[in-house]
């Protein structure tokens, strides 16, 4: 059996902009931190947990306390909820994402699916629900499962193996939109399928993605590229900086 692991922001949901805006505002409101560097690729770990850890170490010389982390999460999720009430279009799915996820999960016996995101669990589930994507029954891992994307993807694989009762997958494909997603796939020796168009697609290809699609509307192409995509080989750090996009 093969495993397809989906990122969320920019991959299943078109929420990069709203996620980043609320994330930055939450730090300002919850902890009076107003000068966040939003070049997320510059952080050691491009995840909500990793970025938060780095910011607290930089500003206060320590890790966040649990009460501080909870305050930040609550503020962030509250802002996302408020934004959805006023602008639900900011939470649209990437075209065809819900259908492709469902088809792979329910109709294609060769494939299993999982979700691995740098988002915190509560915010991730909110965005999936807002985009009418049903994660029920899909093994998932979130920012709570590790600071690094590598740890999060490993957790998703482990939960998938456990749920299916198998010892290994014959093929694992990570699906994402960020340069850090390419890097993570390469480090884990996973095949990678990029999601992007125009300049963003070019950057993914320059980073080592052998296959990139604009969205999931052509399910036949999705299946074809899942089988053909290769493990990224080029050095992530040789690629020019990526414009700011959400860490999820």
Image (cartoon, rainbow, N blue to C red):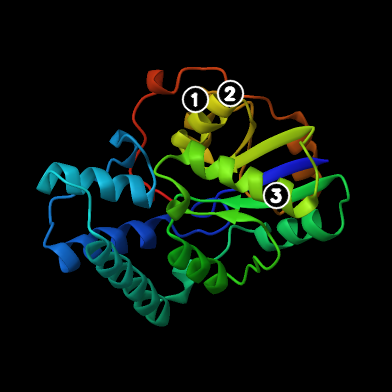
Q: Nearer the viewer, residue 148 or 65?
A: 65
Asked if residue 142 lies left or right of residue 64, the reply is right
- Which residue is located at x 63 percent, y 58 percent? 95
- For label 2, the SS is loop
The answer to which of marks 2 and 3 sits earlier in the sequence is 3
Quadrant location, the N terminus? top right
Asked if residue 196 lies left or right of residue 26, the reply is right
Q: Which mark is residue 53?
A: none
Residue placed under numbered mark 3 in the picture: 160
- Which residue is located at x 11 percent, y 47 percent? 59
Foreground disc of the pair 1, 2: 2
Q: Nearer the viewer, residue 125 or 239?
A: 125
Q: Which mark is residue 232?
A: 2
Task: For marks 2 and 3, give the CA distance.
Answer: 23 Å
Residue placed under numbered mark 1 in the picture: 207
- Neighbor class of circle 3 (other Cα within 10 Å; few <14, some 14-19, many 20+) is many
- Which residue is located at x 61 percent, y 53 percent? 115
The answer to which of marks 1 and 3 sits earlier in the sequence is 3
Asked if residue 50 lies left or right of residue 84, the reply is left
Foreground disc of the pair 1, 3: 3
Residue 239's place in the image compared with 199, above or below, is above
- Neighbor class of circle 1 (other Cα within 10 Å; few <14, some 14-19, many 20+) is many
Circles 1, 2 touching at the beta carbon (< 8 Å): yes
Q: Is residue 140 at all visible to an observer of this figure?
A: yes
Q: Is residue 37 at all visible to an observer of this figure?
A: no
> Measured from the top left, where is residue 33 in percent x and y?
13, 57
């Amino acid at each position: 059996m093969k495993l397809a692991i989906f990122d969320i922001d920019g991959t299943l949901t078109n929420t990069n902009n709203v996620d980043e805006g609320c994330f930055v505002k939450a730090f300002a409101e919850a902890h009076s931190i107003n000068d966040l560097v939003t070049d997320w690729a510059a952080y050691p770990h491009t995840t909500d947990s990793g970025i938060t850890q780095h910011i607290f170490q930089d500003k206060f010389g320590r890790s966040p306390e649990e009460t501080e982390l909870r305050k930040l999460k609550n503020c962030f999720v509250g802002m996302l909820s408020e934004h959805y009430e006023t602008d639900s279009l900011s939470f649209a799915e990437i075209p065809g994402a819900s259908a492709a996820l469902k088809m792979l999960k329910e109709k294609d016996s060769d494939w299993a699916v999982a979700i691995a995101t740098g988002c915190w669990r509560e915010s991730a589930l909110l965005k999936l629900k807002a985009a009418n994507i049903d994660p029920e029954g899909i093994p998932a891992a979130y920012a709570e499962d590790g600071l690094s994307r590598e740890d999060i993807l490993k957790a998703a694989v482990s939960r998938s193996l456990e749920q299916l009762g198998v010892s290994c997958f014959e093929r694992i494909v990570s699906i994402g939109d960020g340069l850090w997603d390419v890097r993570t796939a390469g480090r884990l020796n996973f095949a990678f399928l990029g999601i992007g168009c125009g300049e963003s697609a070019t950057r993914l290809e320059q980073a080592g993605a052998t296959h990139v699609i604009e969205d999931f509307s052509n399910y036949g192409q999705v299946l074809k590229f899942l089988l053909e995509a290769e493990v990224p080989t080029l050095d992530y750090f040789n690629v020019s900086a990526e414009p700011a996009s959400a860490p999820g």
